[in-house]
Image (tube, helix red, strand yellow):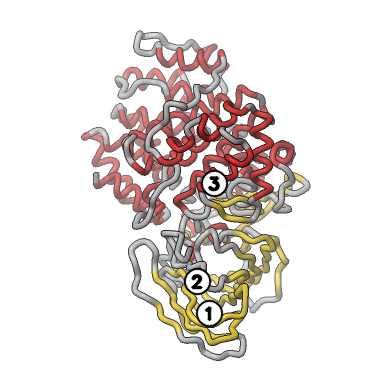
Amino acid sequence: MARSDPHSFFDDAQPRARHLDLELQADFATRRLAGFVRCNFDRSTGGRVDLDTRGLSIASVHDVHDEAIPFTLHAEGPILGQRLELALPPGTDAILIDFATSPNASGLQWLEPAQTDGRRHPFLFSQCQAIHARSLVPCQDSPRARLTYRAALTVPAPLVAVMAAASRGERAAAAGTRTFAFEMPQPIPPYLLALAVGDLASHDVGPRSRVWAEVGLVEAAAHEFAELESMLVAAESLFGPYEWERFDLLVLPPSFPYGGMENPRLTFLTPTLLAGDRSLVDVVVHELAHAWTGNLVTNASQEHFWLNEGATVWAERRILEALHGPEAAMMSWAVNQPSLDNAMARFGSASPLTRLRTELRGVDPDEVFSSIPYEKGARFLHVLELEVGRARFDAFMRAYMRRFRFTSITTEEFVEFLEAELPGAAAAVQANRWLYEPGMPATTPTLKRSARLDAVTAAAASWKSGRRPDAATVSAWSPTEMLLYLQHLPRPLSHEDCAWLAQQLELDGRRNAEIQVEWFTIAARSDYEPARPAIGGFLQRVGRLKYLRPLYGALMQSQRSQPFARKVFETASPGYHGTARRMVAAILDR
Ligand SMILES: [Zn+2]
């Protein structure tokens, strides 16, 4: 197959690094991680080995006898970074590389104390998906090149380091520093390498779970995520044993660009989930589901990303149903429909980027990130479930997870397994249309609806004929129903209507970020100036991509709001993650 991943120099005809030993020191003054990595190959080898790097300084490469190994660091490419070409002498089974990361490493964000909750200490976190592990450590940065690792991370005292790995305690360290040791015994795709450093504390919330957060946030986080064990039990009853020993959470500062990242043993989360009423914990259920779909069975490359995300959204809604009943699952399908519709509209339903199986040679995966692999992917699995019946489909998914555990696979391998286990099902739902053709196929399932769901969308639909929900109706809505109502309102609205909404729905006092942002997009689209301070404040504070895109997008749709959007971005952007900064800049340039 040689180079089968369009986003990596990994060549599977070459020896593979099976295990890394990392020793790194974090220097907040220069914004660098520096140290060395030892790579153990899967066989004694010689000749050329290509590794992925981005922005790394490579000081030296040598073998375990300290003999120098010749290397070439090739020119920087726009998407893949720099190929590190090694010429190994015969009989090499391990190498050591001395290196340092760049202050602009695409997989790291270094935060000033002012960007944290405590405002006293700096913070560092990584985000390696999609193709950023190479900016932390030289590696074969393709999901097919799974590896185990051990790491020792030295940080300034009194800060705490955590990794998405088993803790191996704290080691003796030089004065003014602390060294934390970790081990990841299960083979992971490199994009699941993850670390964070900050003024962190933890609180146990279950027999195999604790919540990590900045000291001042840890109690609120422990309250919000108190139900982890029941989620684990529900998920295991559906998909089999949880294979990662611990399910801990880390709440990051608000610039974290994603809702959650399924780093094994330690899921990374945005603090925008801290609604106070546990109304946004479905993101945690999603990250938990990844323990099976994504982390255990992994996409072979970004071209098969739907295998990670579509399967996880499907699994997430099955767990939600097991925990809270069919109504909760129905609501989840319904409130996520607009994100699918918006992504289809953004690309155009004839765009090849709306296929499930994509072709991404020459394409930066961060730039084409959207809801399509998530929501279209989940609908594809759901239509298969409807076709063969739930019992048979559940058995199929369990068999799939067993068959491909700790491997990284392609869409084609999925289809082959599907045909073997459920002959004829693929043809019956026109699987090829879902996978290889753009847009939504004719076999798209009609999702089940409940009376409550219909009541909320009917209330929104009657807005145009002047009908408004009374106070009793509004106060009986769950946060998800409130969100659904706002999603279905027409826009722009008159300023009078915006004022009515803000007051009747008490929108200024809402802590649920999904409701806040939906309201802000209505207000922004409607050029409703009284909401501007709140919108500006939110955009200054929060760097989650899911919110930045619709908010800046809505502001830019009105001539009058455009200068406001640009001004907010100018002051907010230094605090955004690099991926967020690039995405918003593109929206403002359009
Ligand atoms: Zn996911």
Q: Contact, CB < 8 Å: mark 1 with mark 2?
A: yes
x and y, in percent, of residue 40 in the image: 61, 75
Q: Is residue 14 left or right of residue 83?
A: right
Q: Is residue 270 left or right of residue 557?
A: right
x and y, in percent, of residue 157 in the image: 62, 69
Residue at 68% across / 30% down in the picture? 391
x and y, in percent, of residue 57 in the image: 44, 77
| Pointer 3 residue Cβ closer than 8 Å to ligand 1 | yes
Residue at 46% across / 17% down in the picture? 457
As helix, strand or loop, the secondary structure at mark 1 comes to: strand
Q: Which residue is mark 3?
A: 308
Along the viewing direction, whichever of 447 and 194 lies nearer the viewer: 447
As helix, strand or loop, the secondary structure at mark 3 comes to: helix
Whichever of callouts 1 and 3 sits on the residue coming sooner in the sequence is 1
x and y, in percent, of residue 50 in the image: 46, 73
Choose mark 1 or mark 3, whichever is in front: 3
Around disc 2, counting alpha carbons within 10 Å, would you say few (fewer than 14), some (14 to 19), or many (20 or more)? many
Whichever of callouts 1 and 2 sits on the residue coming sooner in the sequence is 1
Q: Of all residues shown, which one is farthest toward the left?
A: 559
Circle 2: residue type: Pro
Q: CA distance from mark 1 to mark 2?
A: 8 Å
- Can residue 541 be seen from the camera position used here? no
Q: Which residue is mark 2?
A: 138
Q: Which residue is mark 1?
A: 97
Q: CA distance from mark 3 to mark 2?
A: 24 Å
Around disc 3, counting alpha carbons within 10 Å, would you say few (fewer than 14), some (14 to 19), or many (20 or more)? many
Circle 3: residue type: Asn
